[in-house]
Amino acid sequence: MKQKVNFIDLGLIDYKKCWDRQEAFFNKIISVKTANRNSNTRRPTPNFLIFCEHPHVYTLGKSGEEKHLLLNEKSLKEKNAVYYKINRGGDITYHGPGQIVGYPILDLDNFFTDIHKYLRFLEEVIILTLKDYGIESGRITGLTGVWINWKNPAKARKIGALGVRTSRWVTMHGFAFNVKCDLSYFSNIVPCGIQDKGITSLEKELGEQVKTSEV
């Protein structure tokens, strides 16, 4: 039962509202683990997986640089976008309609206690989904995320981004998979602090429309 995961599809939801939801689940798991440690009990911890999309938003991780956001407050309003500094790892990224965002809030003690392996598994989810659509993708050494044309650095295009937070082996935040989002919004940032790589989406690579619900 410890490996049971509660799946929640929140649809299109404000970033801050969803972040608060994540924090609530995250703190719930931490509180159970703390109580188990303090009382020497073994109450099972829950696991959650949120799928959603967000209105236009830029988020900056703890290791990011604000200069990688190329918009001022006025420009953000003109783009109908908002900006948050958040408590995940990584630099700056964009979320918007047409992008599947996955937030696994898991107690890794229920699965395996290896953050590197966890990140690679998140990437593998996107790699295998792309394979279902006949698109080959992979990883670039030293960079997180999923890339098209990953073997040719000059032509590599990012299609999936990762950024997580962990505490006591409990995870939050997660991945963003570009399905059919407006890629022009990425031109307003230096995505993940990487200046020499492109950004793409499933629809752009396929050259045809896809249903986000199907993906």
Image: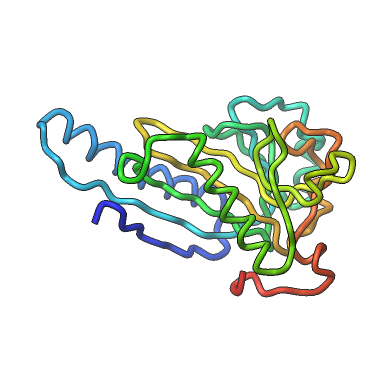
Q: Nearer the viewer, residue 100 or 169?
A: 169
What residue is drawn where x is 88% and y is 45%?
155
Image location of residue 90, percent across then percent down: 62, 32
Give the vertical position of 70 relative to 183 (above or below). Answer: above
Q: Is residue 135 left or right of residue 132?
A: right
Q: Is residue 165 left or right of residue 76?
A: left
Q: Position of residue 165 (x, y in %)?
A: 48, 35
Query: Would you place residue 50 above or below residue 152 in this image?
Result: below
Looking at the rendering, which quadrant does residue 89 occupy?
Answer: top right
Front-most of residues 119 and 53: 119
Nearer-the-camera pick, 133 or 191? 133
Q: Residue at x 11, y 32 (%)?
A: 40
Which quadrant of the rendered structure holds the C terminus? bottom right
The percent coordinates of residue 84 (x first, y second) are 61, 38
The quadrant holding residue 131 is bottom right
Q: Is residue 107 shown left or right of residue 104? A: left
